[in-house]
Structure formats: C-alpha cells, structure tokens
Amino acid sequence: MMKGSRVRFGLALALLCVSNIGNIEMLAQNGDSSKASDEKLIYADFQKLENGRLVSSRGGRTQLNRWAQNMGAAPKMRGLENAEPPAPAPARVTDQDTAAAFEYEMRMPNEWAGVSMEVFGQPEKDGKPVADDISGYKYMTLRLFGKGPKEVRVELVSRGQGVSLESGYPQMTFRVSPGFNTYKFKLDEFRQPEWAEKLDFKRDILKKLTSVTIGVFCEKCRLESGTVVVDNLAFEK
Ligand SMILES: [Ca+2]
C-alpha cells in the first residue's frame, strides 16, 4: 500500500523545511477524519492548524515539553518557529497529508532528560483540560518516523482532573524501526514507572485522559540529536 521510497522522499523534504512550513494552510482537506466512530477514535491526524499551531482532530492544542535532571544542560528542542509555548511543526507527508514533527538534541551532563510532544484531545474549557473516556478502547495506534532515537516513549496523561503528576504517567516504550511505520500498543500493557505515585489506571487515566505524549529520553545522557515525526494517533477497539 505504501510507496516506501516516495514517502521517504517526502519526509526528507518535509524535514528539511520544517522551519518554513508554519504557514501551510491547505491542511484541512482530509474530510471527516476527525469524527470519532465507535470503532476508532482518531485522536490526532494533524490536518488542522489553529493560530498557526497544529491541533488534534477535535481541536486540542499541541505543545513541546522538555525535562532534565540538570536543566543547565537541558535538551534543545525545535519545532514551530517562534511558538510560545513551544509547539511541534507541521511536516508534509504528501500534498494532502501533514504530520507533527520536532527535532531534539540531548546535552551533557545529565542523569536523565527528555523531550516530548504533548497532544490534547480537546480544547480547554474554563482554562482546564477536558477529559476523554477511552476505557472502551483496547489499542493505541500511531504512525511514527524517528531519525536518531532508538526508542520512543508514549504516555497516557490526565491533567487537572483530580490527578496531578509531574511525571510517571502510564507509559509504553518501544524500539523505532526504519521508515514511517504504524505502531500498535495494547492499552492494558501501559505501566507506570516503579518510582511513580501509583494511580488507578482505569479510573484516573482511561476514564479521564486529557492528553498523550510522544517523546524521546535518555539516561546517563550522551550527545545525541534526532527528529521525530508523528501522525494518525488513534484509539481502537
Ligand atoms: Ca496527517
């Protein structure tokens, strides 16, 4: 189905001009892909911009986060130019298809550090994130291209809904294969790290999901840089 070489070529082009494509306005052509069906919730296909920033399928905002044990050597991250707060950049997959991208650079010394893209399902209401109940779904799927990272981590996050962790949300870490591939994860295999404050996965997260992060991380960090491109984040039965 996928014309591998063409997709790669498209991606290479997109990544080369990641900083120049903030004003693509031809994104919203993919029809009704933002509609949630019973079988599948298209969480983010990155076909829409609001105020120049990529939003999720139902208009939730996107942002870039970073963290580090030593913030003096915090990772560098690059997405949409001149965005405050920082945001991923639109990256062109095809004429009709846009993804969300960021570049990162890990710096030393750092015991641990990371950069992630956070995607909210819905726009805020009264200044608060709005939650989704995804407990009826079994899988998360997403399409991802990674140049640089061996592994990528996705997290299921709930903010402002009674739970407030700085970090340690249920997560899944996976090895990145070459190419722009679709990955599929079982939701019930997401786990919190051992050191995290324990949450009730169903009550606190699956029933109150506000956002998803997709990110890169390091422990005993070395100098390392790369690019991550994400598209078609969905929950499936
Ligand atoms: Ca897309």
Image (cartoon, rainbow, N blue to C red):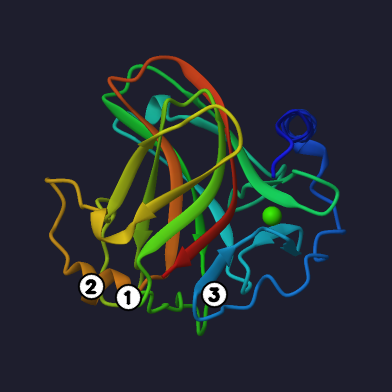
Frontmost residue, 184 versus 67: 184
Q: In the rendering, at what x and y percent does residue 6 appear?
A: 78, 32
Mark 3 → mark 1, Cα distance in angstroms: 17 Å
**Relative to 5, 144 lies left or right:** left
- Per the model, the C-alpha gap separating discs 2 and 1 is 7 Å
Q: Which residue is mark 2?
A: 202
Point out the frontmost of discs 3 and 2: 2
Say what amino acid the circle numbered 3 marks: Gln
Q: Earlier in the sequence, mark 3 or mark 1?
A: 3
The residue singled out by tag 3 in the image is: 122
Q: Is 70 situated above or below 41?
A: above
Q: Does 200 appear above or below 111?
A: below
Q: Are marks 2 and 1 in contact (CB under 8 Å)?
A: yes
Image point (74%, 36%), residue name:
3
Residue nearest the viewer, comparing 114 with 39:
39
Residue type (three-letter) at the residue carrying disc 2: Lys
